[in-house]
Amino acid sequence: MANEVKEKSEVAFIDEMVYGSKILYLEGHNDINNGQISFRDGQSIWIRRAFMGWEETTHDDFINIDLDGNRIAGEGVIPAEWPLHTETYRAREDVNCIIHSHPPYAMIFSATALELKAVTHDATPIIDTTRFTLTTNTVTNKGIAQEVAKALQKSNTMLLKNHGIVAAGKSIPETVCWAIALENACKLQLLAESTGVPYGSSEAHEVKMKKKIIFGTTALREYWAYWCRKVDHHFNESRRTGL
């Protein structure tokens, strides 16, 4: 009975990781290297295998590894950047899901010295985004990964210079939301910058209120439900039309 319960719980979070991967695809988190999504499962993690597009993700594309990178279950190539995930989990007991991706606007933003501002609602939940500037390279060893985890501290989001983003959260839906919000915030601020004219942003007290209302528990649940419907519609329509 205990094994059946565990199998059912695993299916639940694997389902969410499949949806999360396809949501990231539809929201523009696409790059030749794509990235990873992982989930904490006790003293191990499940991580999406390497060398595949976000949109290609299925239930069979997740590998269970321990915090030292050793395979426990699953097929495929373990992503080289697994230390980025495992060292963050070691440092952050509050984190159960991590996304590392390479969305275009966040990558451009990370290459600038711009301060992230709450130009639109998108920036309010991730206004405390940290920056990692120690290297622009991939994070494939524990030493650098520990520095990433240290820099992330209590924030839910990070910009890796000339590289991409890290989003960390208590759940898969929450973490997907932070990843999408960060890319959107970077995109819209870069558009504001491109106008060449002064622009405003929300004051600190407004940011605090918006976090509670626009990105509260109910809102996050409904955003996730919408994104899942969007995935279902897109991929079912693609199969129907043969695209």
Image (cartoon, grey):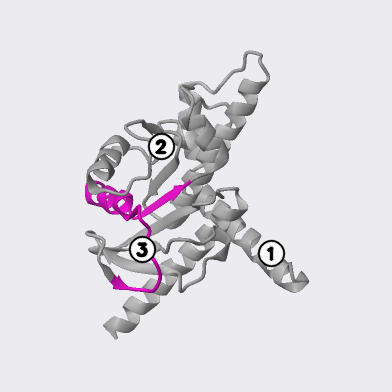
Which residue is identified by label 1? 233
On screen, residue 124 above or below 66? above
Q: Which contiguous range is marked in magenta?
A: 72-101
Kind of residue at disc 2: Leu
Q: Quick one: quadrant of the C terminus?
A: bottom right
**Quarter holding residue 50:** bottom left
- Residue 108 in magenta stretch: no
- Tell which residue pokes out farthest to the top in this image: 198
Instruction: Name the residue: 47% across, 37% down.
Output: 125
Helix, strand or loop at mark 2: strand
Distance of label 1 from label 3 (alpha carbons) = 30 Å
Distance of label 3 from label 2 (alpha carbons) = 21 Å
Mark seen at residue 78: 3
Left-right relation of 198 to 81? right
Instruction: Name the residue: 50% across, 21% down.
Output: 203
Helix, strand or loop at mark 3: loop
- Tell which residue pokes out farthest to the right in this image: 241
